[in-house]
Image: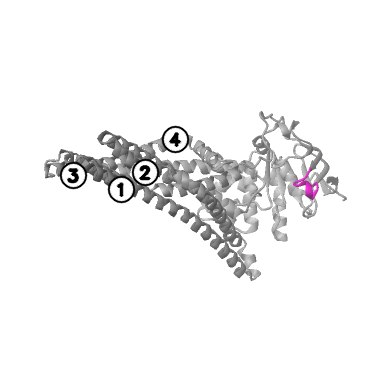
Amino acid sequence: MTPVRDLLRILGLWRQGGGWLAFGALVAAASALAGLALMALAGQGVAQGLATGTLAGAASLILLRPLIILRPLLRWGERMATHEATFRALADTRTWFFRRLSERLSAGPGLTRSGDLLGRLVTDVEALDGFYLRALVPMTAAASVVLAVSVILGALSPGLATLVVLPLALALFLPVIVAPFAARAAARAADATGALRAEAVEPLIAMEDILAANAEPRAVARVEEAAWRMDRERRRLTRAGSLGAASGTVLTQAALLGALAWGIAGGTAEAGAVVVALFLVLAAMDALGALPRAGAALALAAAGARRLLEAADQPIPVPDPPASAVPAGHALSMRGIRFAWNEERGPVFEDLSLDLPEGARIALLGPSGIGKSTLAALLLKLAAPQEGRITLGGADYATLSADAVRARVACLTQDATLFDDSIAANLRIAAPEAPEAALWEALERARIADLIRALPDGLETRCGEAGARFSGGQARRIALARALLSPASIIILDEPTAGLDAATERAFLETLDTALGGRSAVLITHRLIGVERPTRILRLAGGRALPAMS
């Protein structure tokens, strides 16, 4: 995908805010033209003064007064309109990007390191503000100024207009000339920035392990090396912009020299037109001065757009069908399932079959790495089998949308996350419209309600990052309450007691039978401790689900 196509696609994402974008560009053009008019009238007044020997009678100077007031107002309006347009456009881009990622990365980031993915969501989206603020808007303003200069000078002296406007018109092309030279440096700078984020974020996430292994100096060295690479690429990008700036200065100086040369050749007959031309070129220099930076901004925006679209265009692991069926019930069946995350690593399941009747409780046992969590991913439609058939209420999974499946099937994962928000907000992830009474009911069933009531802020208590406000067992019970709050008829419990001590594990599992009520459940665990009371026990082995030996 070419940079131009990438940027056009980004513009397509901004259609909803197109009115603001157009309005901001128009105000910027009006502001630049007001500045040009100010200088044109000043030049005409000076020319009249030179012709009459006094400036007092220069009628054009009277018109300067409203323009002196209007110009700053337009500049203020330009800043307000263009920044409002940019904020709206970037907000739309982030929302679109997050939705695309949620469809494609349902089983985890996968395609890239988490720090780099964060960089794409933050830094690369922010680079797009340069596409509008530092490229499209200045180019629009500069083009309107050059057009106005050509009209004004064309009316005064066509020959003078040619000498002045030609170099100014060439300056309009500087962004598209500079951008290809800066593109490679911009792409490398964007990649280097992403690498720096990854090198900085990953050690922070695993700081305990880093410190325990005395690996802090090595982590710091990697961050320093990544920062040096980023700075090197940004210096290269700056050099490309500096070359464009120098070219812009040469072209505007050529316009000034052209006006002076015409005045020398034309003598006093052309003096008035030349004075006006000099004033116009000085005004145009303000608008044209931003164009070389516009080239670098285009290159950076194109690099950011490439990285965004690269992540957003990953294939959807399990596409939804064109039309979704409606399951008649919630009996679950798997027949002849073959699945491999990667064919080179071999299949996780070979001819896997199992049934979960309505209201049944299956305990699925097996050691780590045998495929227990993979089974949960298949049942949640985060992945699809290469062979075999899964049905829910008699309807084939292939005919069901992901939303339809997850409305019937919920999961309590082994690393269920509590977000740094209130308990109520964490619970309502499963049911956004749930009233407070439903939250308390779910907490009661998970046997954590008394603890929450004793907290000063109750349901508004913040959980802290990753649930740091609570112990492991307490956090797991809040996560269970969230799963129970879901209207799903089937609950998957994927290693729900992982990381808990024996007493907390036993207390948690004793809760489950009462908490689940009449729902179907799949308990995925590496062992049973005797309090779970499943209706059937299966063991994963050799890619199949086999009856467990009693």
Q: Is residue 470 above or below residue 334?
A: below
Q: CA distance from mark 3 to mark 2?
A: 25 Å
What is the span of residues highlighted in magenta in the rendered image? 339-347
**Neighbourhood count class around disc 2 (C-alpha, 10 Å): few under 14, some 14–19, many 20 upward:** some
Task: Say whether residue 456 is left or right of residue 52.
Answer: right
Q: Evaluate if marks 1 and 4 touch, with contact meaning CB atoms under 8 Å apart.
A: no
Question: What is the number of the mark on residue 46?
Answer: 3
Q: Is residue 191 above or below residue 359?
A: below
Label 4: element kind: helix
Rendered image quadrant of residue 98:
top right
Q: CA distance from mark 4 to mark 2?
A: 32 Å
Choose the circle earlier in sequence order: 4 or 2: 4
Residue type at mark 2: give it: Pro
Label 3: element kind: helix
Q: CA distance from mark 2 to mark 1?
A: 11 Å
Which residue is painted at 65% across and 56% down in the image?
A: 473
- Picture coordinates of residue 452 (x, y %)? 57, 53
Residue type at mark 4: give it: Gly
Q: What residue would you read off at disc 1?
A: 257
Judged from this view, the residue extending furthest toward the right is: 549
Can residue 69 be seen here? The reply is: no
Q: What residue would you read off at disc 2?
A: 167
**Neighbourhood count class around disc 1 (C-alpha, 10 Å): few under 14, some 14–19, many 20 upward:** some
